[in-house]
Amino acid sequence: MGQPIMDKTPQDGLLPTVELIIQAAIFALGLCWGSFLNVCIYRLPRGLSVVAPRSSCPHCGKMIPPYHNVPVLSWLILGGKCRDCKGPISPRYLVVEVLTGVLFLSCYLHFGPTLATVKCAVLGFLLLGLIFADAETKLLPDALTLPGLALGIGFSLVVPVNDLASRIMPGLVSATMRSEISWRLWSLSDSLLGAAVGASFLYGAAAIYLRARGVEGMGFGDVKLMAMIGAFLGTKLTVLTIFAGSLAGSIFGLSAVLAVWVKRWRRIEARGASSIVARRRAWQSARVMLRYYQMPFGVFLGAMAMLSFLFGNVLLHWYWRAL
């Protein structure tokens, strides 16, 4: 005899639909915040208000009507150009809106309907703004890093931050003591320690570079960025972010130097110089670039911080098991 067929209740088909609607709403919310983030990226490094005046074309200065300010759709419909003067509108506006939407949705899919999702989305919003601002202007606005530092510390009281001391030296904190002391105190302590470690490491590295090379290797904005990252991530993931960000920045810097050297070498050889002379003069150009080029280090720190927040614990768990 065959198994009886169970009728599906209406709720069985309704739940996936509701979940899809929630995900679509979160993605749309991310697009809207991404549109506002574009305003922050453009105005904050220039010391302008993000509230007034209304959005306007950077070429002709005409106000953009609300129906031409719809995230993603407006840029696509207008073809990336101003409606009035036909001046080009940077693809960055489209990219930031889409990235913010994807980021918000990723946070929800990763953490579910929890406060950790809100923390993840806030951190991602701040990091995206700082990454693009640093890439475009070589500036990391205090209007993002300092409120971000306060938010990171505040979130530690409602979303646990894993403390480094109890993991590396479990005997340092007894089980009885842990049960007596609120996890919020430990979480807050690790948030503050992460901010201190991140800021101190970057400040120390900048001081050493300045003494060794005689020029500034990074600005104080990077120090405040790492303080903000440390407040959100805690000590353990802050150390991981510094290591991964430094590695990514080094690879980018060496690749840029190599690209300048090869391009310069070929150009000089094309003018009739010998290969030896071309290589020597190309290396001189590469050395000048290495000495004076201001690498947007905040781009690499911000990107690695977001990856560390989402996947850092999994990576470290795998690493400790592999040892």
Image (tube, rainbow, N blue to C red):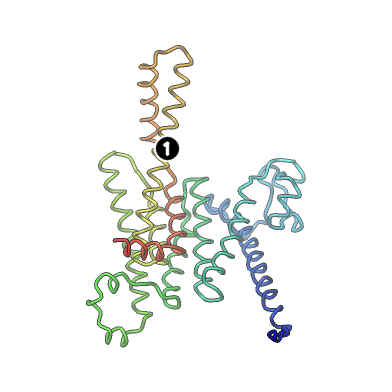
Q: Position of residue 217 (x, y in %)?
A: 35, 44
Of residues 194 and 249, the one drawn nearer to the viewer in this rendering: 249
Of residues 202 and 102, the one drawn nearer to the viewer in this rendering: 102
Q: Is residue 144 left or right of residue 278?
A: right
Q: Residues within 10 Å of mark 1 (few under 14, many from 20)?
A: few
Q: Compared to 261, does 134 lie above or below?
A: below
Q: How many marks?
A: 1
Name which residue lies at 59% across and 54% down.
Answer: 96
Q: Is residue 197 left or right of residue 315?
A: left
Q: Position of residue 225 (x, y in %)?
A: 42, 57
- On the image, which quarter does residue 39 sit in? bottom right
- On the image, which quarter does residue 179 sit in? bottom left
- On the image, which quarter does residue 5 sit in? bottom right
Q: Position of residue 25 (x, y in %)?
A: 67, 69
Residue at image mark 1: 255
Name which residue lies at 55% across and 73% down.
Answer: 112
Q: Amino acid at mark 1?
A: Ser
Name which residue lies at 39% across and 27% down.
Answer: 285
Q: Is residue 219 visible?
A: yes
Q: Is residue 310 left or right of residue 91?
A: left
Q: Compared to 166, does 295 lie above or below?
A: above
Which residue occupies the extreme top position in the image? Answer: 272
Q: Is residue 228 visible?
A: no
Q: Compared to 269, does 2 lie above or below?
A: below
Q: Position of residue 104 (x, y in %)?
A: 58, 64
Which residue occupies the extreme left position in the image? Answer: 171
